[in-house]
Image (spheres, grey):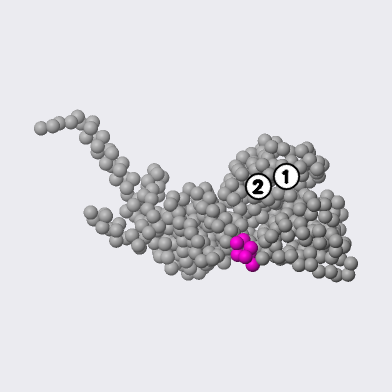
Amino acid sequence: MNRYPLWKYLLIGVALVVAFLYTLPNFFGEVPAVQVMPVRTTEKVDAALMQRVEAAVKAAGISPRGVSMDPRGVKARFADTDTQIKAKDVLQRSLGAGYTVALNLLPASPEWLSSIGALPMYLGLDLRGGVHFLLQVDMPKALDKAAERYQGDIRTLLREKKVRYTGIGREGQMVYVHFRDAAQRDEARKAIETAYPDLQLGDSQSGEEFSLTGTLKKQAQVKTQEDALKQNLTTLRNRVNELGVAEPVIQQQGIDRVVVQLPGVQDTAKAKEILGRTATLEIRMVDEEKMQDAATVQAAMAGQAPFGTEVYLERNGVPVLVKKNVVLTGDYITDAQPGFDNQSNQAAVPVNLDGRGARIFRNVTRENVGKRMAILLIEKGKTEVVTAPVIREEIGGGRVQITGMDSPQEANDVALLLRAGALAAPMEIVEERTVGPSLGADNIERGFNS
């Protein structure tokens, strides 16, 4: 008869106990919940926010099964999905646009198990459940952005060809160029038709002003929309990968919609925020001459900005007049990482540009030493001036640092979005729901019985 030392039996017993402990979370399942987190990372998650959440749901006659708080937000648990959805709508109306309110699935296991790192085993969306988003692409915005790109490209082309023009601008999806005589207009037409065959050109005359207009041809519009959807799919995949979600489902539905399924996601508010954000970066020159006139700045704030300029606010509320001409966009970014500014010891985002972007940035800084350059962050249609430093010297090497971040968390979020790529067109979440493990419930039960 074989006999083993006592320590071996003890080792086997300890291993079985530890294995059983870390298996326990899988038996408790998950409960529907609603997660609330501030949109801006500078706003704190505190007891006051938790009290607001509790008061809002109780005022609507909803009794949560528990409300908890962590550094990322406030989470309220509910008995079933119907109550969960009702509570989400109530909280969204009560808290307003300053907070992200998202559906979630939270483990029902006791907190002491989570404290020792005992978490449920990963399962797919059909087995464990998760979150389902349906996003719709704003196709008209994609065409607007295409027209904006053509506006800058035509301006550069005419300068290279030394064709004189009196003005260039954009109205919706149409780009227009004004000339003093028909000869210059005809010369510009030949150059634009050769360089940009996707544009449908038309000419007109008003008094002594000759104009040329350009709009995308129908076939080019369809291709632009298809490319926008493909780019958004790629960007969403990059963003989800940055979130660390295992085996997500991101696929096209129809001509302008995207389905995103995130199995077992805990921080759905963060996922919802990252998926829906459309952060893009623009670098423009500050209009120094008009900024010196206080009356001009006040008129711009009242909605009467001077021709060729736009007014935006810095984070401290100071208005800045910037030129409409975009010097550089986030399309030239190859990498962005969160960091710190050594001089101010504040959160910052160092950004690396590709070869073409580095050349453009070097030329612009060389030609504008002593002038201010505004770095604009555009999110969900809102534009703010993150920083507007004075150019001290020519900057080469293709490395730019964005300062003015309110916190390391914001620097991390902005770096993630810039690194993952900008959306070709804004996207709106039109449907959001939690998916229960109903499809695989029978298989789980059979496997457990086996």
Q: Residue at x 53, y 60 (%)?
A: 101
Q: Going by the image, does 80 lie left or right of 351?
A: left
Q: Residue at x 84, y 59 (%)?
A: 184
Q: Residue at x 55, y 53 (%)?
A: 235
Q: Amino acid at mark 2?
A: Tyr
59 to 377, vertically: above or below: below
> Does the rendering let one see residue 62?
yes
Real-space CA distance between mark 1 and mark 2, rounded to the nearest whole angstrom? 10 Å
From the viewer's side, name the closer residue of 211 and 56. Answer: 211
How many other residues sit within 10 Å of disc 1, few (<14), some (14-19) or many (≥20)? Answer: some
Secondary structure category for the residue under label 1: helix
The span shown in magenta is 218-224
The quarter of the picture where the C terminus appears is bottom left
| Tag 1–tag 2 contact (CB < 8 Å) | yes
From the viewer's side, name the closer residue of 62 and 301. Answer: 301
Which mark, by number, is residue 360? Answer: 1
Q: Amino acid at mark 1?
A: Ile
Residue 88 image offset from top left, x and y in percent: 50, 64
> Does the rendering let one see residue 63?
no
Which mark, by number, is residue 185? Answer: none
Q: Going by the image, does 319 lie left or right of 356?
A: right
Q: Residue at x 80, y 43 (%)?
A: 367
Q: Going by the image, does 229 lie left or right of 193?
A: left
Is 220 a magenta residue?
yes
Residue 371 image offset from top left, x and y in percent: 81, 44
Residue 355 image offset from top left, x and y in percent: 66, 42
Residue 330 image offset from top left, x and y in percent: 65, 50
Residue identified by numbered label 2:
332
How many other residues sit within 10 Å of disc 2, few (<14), some (14-19) or many (≥20)? Answer: some
